[in-house]
Amino acid sequence: MNNNTNIKKENNLNNLNNKIEKNNNKIEEEKNDEIKKEEKKEIEQDDEEEEEEEQEDNEKEEDEKEEKSNENLNNEIINNYQTILTNSIKKAEKEIEEAYDRISYLKEKLIESKKGQSCSSVKLSEKEINMVLDKAYPILKNEPSMLELEPPIYICGDIHGQFYDLLRVFDILKYPPESKFLFLGDYVDRGKKSLECILLLLCLKIKYPSNIYLLRGNHECEEINRAYGFFDECKRKVSIKIYKQFCNLFNILPITALIGYKILCMHGGLSYELKDKSIKKNS
Ligand SMILES: [Mn+2]
């Protein structure tokens, strides 16, 4: 009996133990499950985070791409402007170069005319004369009413249409830019070749603006040169229109020159009507 009871007890104990073990196992399993779930959750979370990060990265990349494409567009626009600017500068330079070539040719043509020593005039077309006037105008317009010049410089008085005498002056003293000249005005009227004189001087002025200076004389004035020959010469050789163009140019010639701060040069005396403030620079 006692033995039986013992066995029973033992069985019971075993059962209980089994149960406990089972229970423990279950708990363990549940625990494991829980852990697994946790882990899964963590992994999922990690994945999500990763995804978010990836998305952020993508957005960033796209932003960078957009920025870069904007930058490229800006660069393209800047490059286009630069090309346009460079082209227009090149075009202007080419035009100036061509004009210089043409003016050099005109100068040679004018000088060549001396050789014949005949009465035939230099054949300059109205278009060629207009070109000389157009190029000379801004150069003279930018000069002040009183030029301040440095010696050494040759000073030359009235030419009055005596073209061959003008050529002799240059032959003896050398053409600009080898020599520097100040002309005191009265290029036109009286002589037969006023047009040749003023055109050669203007050509040299365009080509060597700081080696030749032209002051205004009393004959570089419409009231005078209409009566003393220049108007008739322009009308006969070219046109009245070109005469008007010359008058416009004469109106902007400088009036005086001060050489080395010592010698004041001008064509004639000062007018009583010229008050101290009447002479303005660039007026
Ligand atoms: Mn005079």
Image: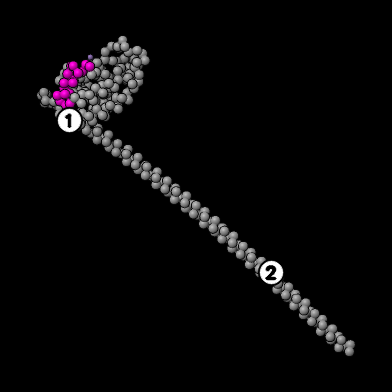
In the rendered image, the residue lying farthest to the right is 2
Task: Please identify the quarter of the rendering in which residue 131 is found.
Answer: top left
Amino acid type, mark 1: Ser
Q: Position of residue 237 (x, y in %)?
A: 15, 25
Q: Disc 1 or 2, which lies upstream in sequence?
A: 2
Q: Position of residue 197 (x, y in %)?
A: 19, 23
In the image, taking residue 48 as reference, residue 18 lies left or right, namely right
Tell whether label 2 touches label 1 (CB within 8 Å): no
Task: Please identify the quarter of the rendering in which residue 119 is found.
Answer: top left
- On residue 34, the disc is 2
Q: Position of residue 134 (x, y in %)?
A: 26, 29
Nearest the viewer among 263 and 82 is 82
Q: Is residue 238 magenta?
A: yes
Residue to which mark 1 is pinned: 125
Does 257 sit above or below residue 9?
above
Q: Is residue 274 magenta?
A: no
**Can I make out residue 182 in this image?**
no
Query: What is the magenta range?
Result: 223-239
What is the quadrant of the N terminus in the image? bottom right
Q: At 30% across and 36% down in the image, what residue appears?
A: 92
Task: Please identify the quarter of the rendering in which residue 97 is found.
Answer: top left
In the rendered image, the residue lying farthest to the top is 272
Query: Under tag 2, what secondary structure?
Result: helix
How many C-alpha atoms fall within 10 Å of the one at disc 2: few (<14), some, or many (≥20)?
few
What is the quadrant of the C terminus in the image? top left
What is the count of numbered marks?
2
